Amino acid sequence: MILIIQDLFHLYVMNSISLDQLLEVEKDFYQTLQTYWRQHNYLQPKWWFIISLSALSPIAWFFLIDKKRITEITCFGLFYGTAASILDSIGSNALFWIYPVRITPYIYPQFYPYDVGIVIIPFMIAYQRWQQDFKKFFLASGVLAAFLAFIAEPTMEVLGIYKELIWKNYYSFPIYWLLSVVCWKIIQKFKAWEKG
């Protein structure tokens, strides 16, 4: 038994990585990422496209949002956006997909313009329009989830801005839809608590 424990300990020590080694690998990675970004992204047409998407989305949101309910609608968007960004980070870090075009090499992983401009703001508009009628919101969210999974994601892939590695766009469909329903339920619960 003692020999087994010693063997396991030696195996662990031989396969462990020190913090200094990890930092060195991360440093190399980020230097490589910065070089790639300068050579293949910065000031290229695809880069300008995502810069435009990042700038135009908040402007469109400002003109489309119901200012009388801005706090509630924005809260819905923040819940959706936070969850979408976390899931996007997990998927990117797990190498389910990658974003060959980045706004900057200093945010990793990233394609937050997609999360905000193409995903979050349309769901906020759907919430704004149909939040009082769950059935209509549910259906509208399903249509929007289908659009994102089966049209927006493949379009971004054709444009070379997004690339699926082991992910399939039809996996995204139920996630977009379920996330919208969960966020709707959370906001309705908060509203009920406010009323007491």
Image (cartoon, rainbow, N blue to C red):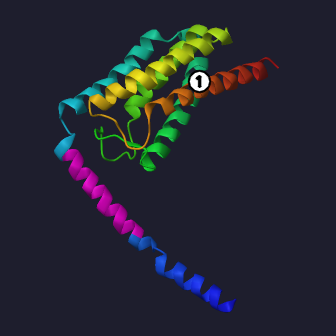
Q: Is residue 117 visible?
A: yes
Query: At which x and y percent is residue 77?
Result: 54, 24
- Please give the name of the residue rendered at 50% of the width and 33% of the height, measured from the top-left corner: 171
Q: Is residue 30 above or below residue 64?
A: below
Q: Position of residue 136 (x, y in %)?
A: 62, 9
Quarter of the image for residue 189 reads: top right
In the image shown, does 190 or 68 lie closer to the viewer?
190
| Count of numbered tags | 1
Amino acid at circle 1: Ser
Q: Is residue 30 left or right of residue 40?
A: right
Q: Which residue is mark 1?
A: 180
Task: Residue at 56%, 28% (x, y): give it.
Answer: 174
Kind of element beneath mark 1: helix
Q: Is residue 65 above or below residue 52?
A: above
Q: x, y percentage for residue 152?
A: 38, 23
Quick check: 108 above or below 25? Answer: above
